[in-house]
Amino acid sequence: MTFQRSLITAALPYANGPVHIGHLAGVYVPADIYVRYLRLKGKKVLFVCGSDEHGVPVTIRARKEGITTQQVVDRYHALIKRSFADFGISFDIYSRTTSETHHQFAADYFRKMYDAGQFVEQTSEQFYDPETGHFLTDRNIRGECPRCHAQGAYGDQCEKCGATLSPDELINPYNAETGNALAKKETKHWYLPLDQYQPWLEKWILEDHKEWRPNVYGQCKSWLDGGLKPRAVTRDLEWGIPVPVEGAEGKVLYVWFDAPIGYISNTIELCQAQPEKYGNWEQWWKQQDTRMIHFIGKDNIVFHCIVFPSMLKAQGYNLPDNVPSNEFLNLEGDKISTSRNWAVWLNEYLDDFPGKQDVLRYVLTANAPETKDNDFTWADFQARNNNELVAIYGNFVNRALVLTGKYFEGHVPECGELTGYDRQTIEEFCHVKDTLESLLENFRFRDAQKEAMNLARIGNKYLADTEPWKLAKTDMARTATILHVSLQIAANLAIAFEPFLPFSSEKLRSMLQMDEQIGWEDLGRIDLLHTGAKLGEVSLLFEKIEDSAIQAQLDRLARIKADNERAARDEALKQWRPSPIKADTNIDEFDKTDIRVATVLDCQPVKKSERLLQFRLDDGMGGRTILSGIAQSYPDPSVLIGKQVLFIANFPPRKMMGIESQGMILSAVDADGRLVVTTVSAPVKNGTQVG
């Protein structure tokens, strides 16, 4: 089918905090690249997004700050919207799910499905806090992870081991906000019967959309292979869109039913405000000649590929043609976490690096987690800016324009006879449009940007090889030809980089005084600039980033890491409970263990071991060596020298790392997991037996 228009949606960011680089790399930068590419081609496109403002986390933040929930979402909606605009994410509309349009449309959508008998009503037991009187969502339940036994795992995931969980699996679940123990209580809800949609979904996804990215296709197949079950579309919450049926008092639309409907309600809002430009909203959502593409993160795959399409199918709407989803972006080797403040926040980046939006866009695209999780580091950020944007792309453009100003008073010089090398260089640009189009149409944005940078490398090499600054002394005609070709290459770069680096491309277009009508279809031509045309004012496209700016970011992360470690220890202490008493024993069994006192003479890490410390003890009996696996709890083992410790003297000797260990140091496991050596508070003779 030939599509007349493209509807592009980007996952709605949650209005509980700012946007960070993980969001940008996963969703918004690739979506914006694709939309800018379509617009550059002259295609009819609509780019829709908005703030997701319902759910439990915003209510928790409101209670913590002593303000209303509306005040919380107002603050973050404004911050996110401004940050996106300043960063150059070119939405046609960025609205919100607390808008009047959305509330009315989402309620109507539910009601139509309800009236058509497209929900099932079920009563089930769910976790409930008897003290607050609130039912809890999975994310608001915490407890001990059943896999790794870490404290503070969420009801849907353990952040320590990464296991996917359900609240019923947690050991000793509690309310994450209050610490209260939980009970189960019956409640009635409406469910979307996904099991009834399974045969259709299997054909639509597994047969009709094998071109979807492997991570998307694979996750959908896993869900389908496991058998779909009805999924709740309502919740027992105070904040949200009230369920518009009798007998649903105190219930709201579940955020994963409500939020994606925001794509439609935002389209309605835009079309009603500007019908002459955007037409009727139904042409974007119901006409078959519209292609819809959802850009999402991998944690949203099931909702955008299974749940939302089932909702759309039920009411006769268009279905997504593709759902490009990236993997996760880590930060300095650690998982980005909003709750731990381990992130690079977009609003802070824009303050710290003014005018460098394109640098972050470039780095996030170069490191895009398209097929696997990837890592953002400040060292790589600096290197890509200084060694690629500045030293290659910027260097080529600056030299070409500065030399033109120097030798030809800023006018495009005449192109004389081309050499074989000139033709070879130009030939490398002839097929760039087809190559870039193929990559962009298949959502391979990282490779597409790399191809654009390769063109800059070609231009940089062309100037370095031809050395017009030397030829100008003897052959001005040849110099003119070289600079003419160089300026045509620069004009091509302005087009090729426009989807990726919009601010820099706009600046380069201005410096080259390019005709506004020059677009994507002109990419690859070498007659974009006319001989004799006057160039604009020349300035640097990119500037070096100094070590001090990078160190400031690393220092900030170091402070956050220290704060997180303290908070984790505090949380572990808060939730710590003594382990169960072991099975009964007797004095005869205890007497078999010979526990004695010794003074630590020396304590050193064992070479090539991450966990072993080597103790040299004065045990009152000639001394002995004991190895103990407590190195990670004692980064400076010298603090133990001179202390009197308890050890088991009658364990048989055992060799570890080539060293004989003659016993075992006694230690206690603290609430935060640290091993603490048991010491004697008052001096006693070395060799004294404990009994």
Image (tube, rainbow, N blue to C red):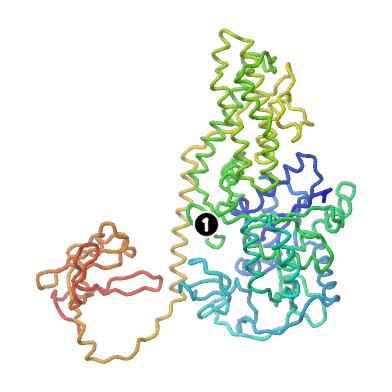
**Residue drawn where x is 52% and y is 51% of the image:** 375
Q: Height in image: 67 above or below 86? A: below
Tell which of 213 and 97 is nearer to you.
Answer: 213
Residue 149 higher or lower than 357, as above or below? below
Seen as rendered, the residue at the extreme left is 622
Q: Position of residue 57 (x, y in %)?
A: 63, 67
- Residue at 64% from the left image edge and 59% from the top image edge: 216
Q: Is residue 561 left or right of residue 482?
A: left
Residue 658 visible (yes or no): yes
Question: What residue is rendered at 64% in x and 14% in y?
Answer: 480
Residue at numbered disc 1: 342
Q: Amino acid at mark 1?
A: Trp
From the top left corner, tell me how far across and down residue 83 is, in percent: 66, 49
Residue at x 34%, y 63% (from the top left corner): 632
- Visible residue check, residue 75: no
| Place of residue 368 in the rendered image (x, y in percent of width and height, measured from the top left) | 58, 49
Of residues 650 and 622, the one nearer the viewer is: 650
- Outermost residue, top side: 474
In terms of secondary structure, where does tag 1 sit?
loop
Number of marks in the rendered image: 1
Q: Residue 640, percent across and down?
A: 24, 65
* 114 to the left or right of 377: right
